Image (spheres, helix red, strand yellow):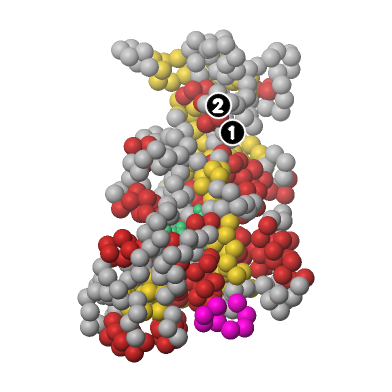
Amino acid sequence: MTQTEASSPSDFIREIIENDLKTNKHGGITATRFPPEPNGYLHIGHAKSVCLNFGIAMQYGGTCNLRLDDTDPSGESLEYVDSIINDVHWLGFDWGGRLFYASDYFEKLYQFAVELITAGKAYVCSLSADEIREYRGSFTEPGKESPYRNRSVDENLDLFQRMRAGEFEDGAHVLRAKIDMASSNVVMRDPILYRIKKEPHYRTGTDWLIYPMYDFAHCLSDAIEGITHSICTLEFDNNRALYDWIIEQLITGRRPRQIEFARLNVSYTLLSKRKLIELVDKGYVAGWDDPRMPTVAGMRRRGYRPEAIRKFCSIIGVAKNENLVDISLLEHCVREDLNEVAPRAMAVLRPLRVVIDNYPEGQTEEFEVPNHPQNQAMGTRKVPFSRVIYIERDDFHENPPKKYRRLGPGREVRLRNSYVLKYERAVKNEHTGEVLELHCTYDKDTRQGPPPDGRKVEGVIHWVSAEHAVPAEIRLYDRLFNVPEPAAESDDFLKNLNNGSLEILTPCYLEPSLKNAAPGSACQFERLGYFCADNKDSRPGKPVFNRVVTLRDSWQKISGQGTI
Ligand code: ATP
Ligand code: MG
């Protein structure tokens, strides 16, 4: 990616940075970081943060660190670390060797805590978790000081050291900052800095039995790495005072600054890790990379390209107010992106067999057709035609409704890239009346143009030659939830799952050029939408395709707002 590509329209964060550069506030340096906790896969909200942090670094000639914020052993794992590294790379960003782990700072952070205790700014508190909560007060009531608040420095140092040595059980003591129990900002009422947690850590094993809290670890990790602008989401607004307090006590010289922006919410999906984990663990989806998931891995498997995701992140911009972005905007970006780059092909999803009675038996013709209607550089391919073809079931109607421009009794249609086809008769199941097969005739003078006698035909339909068709499995994915805000009313978001979010069709028939489609490659099935060979299950000779996105926004049509 180039610097220009990474630049987005300006926003309040970029304004702050430009101003800081002008006033030489950070010595002309812009250093950001993307700090995911490895307790889940990255989702589209994280992608926004990735684009913002890495994009700013590229735009202003700065650096962006990838920091695994792994200070809480519960739920963290190497699998998540690997997926995060993979996904950030795939999104198109590079940290140039600046990959860090907050867990590498455990010793440094411990020493910082000792420094605070020595300065009389932190103490070991032995209240229970419930008591601490009770003593904290509320938005309207000031807090109450802990009876342990005035322990001597020596006693605190001794207890803290013994917490580290494993002498106490979980919850017996915590280390708290000594700030102000009457502060109007609840966060500042002697917040917890360290707790005992006798749980092995995926990297440090059992070396540590106490772990720093986010508020303590995060700002100091920023300072250790020389971060200038620590960009985070709005819910940390109240924590900024604590961020600054800790930095002020412990860091001299260059200090990082926290800036908050509104987190991304997208309609018809969820971006809470806890809820996404529940979907995976309870088997509502087939893993973190299920193509319906809003995860980077899911979107990649679905067939979204990083270009489309970056475009989306650039369009939605950065703001200070929470809002809900319509998922159709993301789908629009995906559609626009694929429209440019995806080669066209023909595939029949719900096949109806058609015998062309006047086409010579055993004959095959090969039509050379363009891979892209606008882009000649994408070349051509050969599509075979023969006496028996498949068309889409719903491209034939015995009693065509008004405005139906496809095949029916007495009608002719253009076969895409081929001849004009005329309906003759249908073969039906005598008991059910189901149409099993059509018999048609073709007009051999229509290969290159309209019928010479000037008669009009109905619309254009797609087809695949039966003899040459490649059977395939096709997975039609749709939105995961059937309401715009699945967790708005209650936490019972599972009741809003869209039962029709996956439909598997087999056998479908593809034109032969798709037989060995490379897993992960996308194309447009003409008239149907964009599809992508599944990056896990598709094999050369045995293709499996995912529907990436329809050609138009079909949900808009349903809700009656569209004009399609
Ligand atoms: P957790 O509840 O586990 O803290 P999280 O979504 O905050 O979940 P992190 O791994 O802490 O996950 O997030 C890493 C970075 O991504 C943070 O800087 C966070 O602000 C940012 N981020 C997370 N979710 C969103 C979102 N929906 N929109 C924008 N940025 C986000
Ligand atoms: Mg977080």
Magenta run includes residue 254 = yes
Please state which amino acid type lies under the numbered disc 1: Arg
Q: Where is residue 510 in the image (x, y as percent from the top left)?
A: 50, 39
Compare residues 294 and 142 and report the one nearer the observer. 142
Majority secondary structure in the magenta region: loop
Tag 1 and tag 2, C-beta contact below 8 Å? yes
Q: Position of residue 34 (x, y in %)?
A: 54, 67
Number of residues whose C-alpha sits closer than 10 Å to that of mark 1, classed few (under 14), some (14–19) or many (20 or more): some
Horizontal side, residue 116 vs residue 530: left or right? left
Q: Earlier in the sequence, mark 1 or mark 2?
A: 1
User: Which image quarter: residue 274?
Assistant: bottom left
Q: Can residue 6 be seen in this view?
A: no
Between marks 1 and 2 in the image, the one whose residue lies nearer the viewer:
2
Question: Magenta segment, which residues?
Answer: 248-255
Give the number of the disc on residue 506: none
Q: Mark 2 points at which residue?
A: 557
Q: Position of residue 90 (x, y in %)?
A: 54, 62
User: Which image quarter: residue 385?
Assistant: top right
| Image quarter hosting the C terminus | top right
* 530 relative to 163, above or below: above
- Does the beta carbon at disc 1 come under 8 Å from ligand 1? no
Magenta run includes residue 57 = no
Give the number of the disc on residue 552: 1
* 127 relative to 163, above or below: above
Q: Position of residue 30 (x, y in %)?
A: 67, 72
Please state which amino acid type lies under the numbered disc 2: Lys
Identify the residue at image location x=30%, y=12%: 431
Horizontal side, residue 244 vs residue 452: left or right? left
Horizontal side, residue 40 vs residue 228: left or right? left
Compare residues 136 and 163 and report the one nearer the observer. 136
Q: How far apart are marks 1 and 2 (CA)?
A: 9 Å
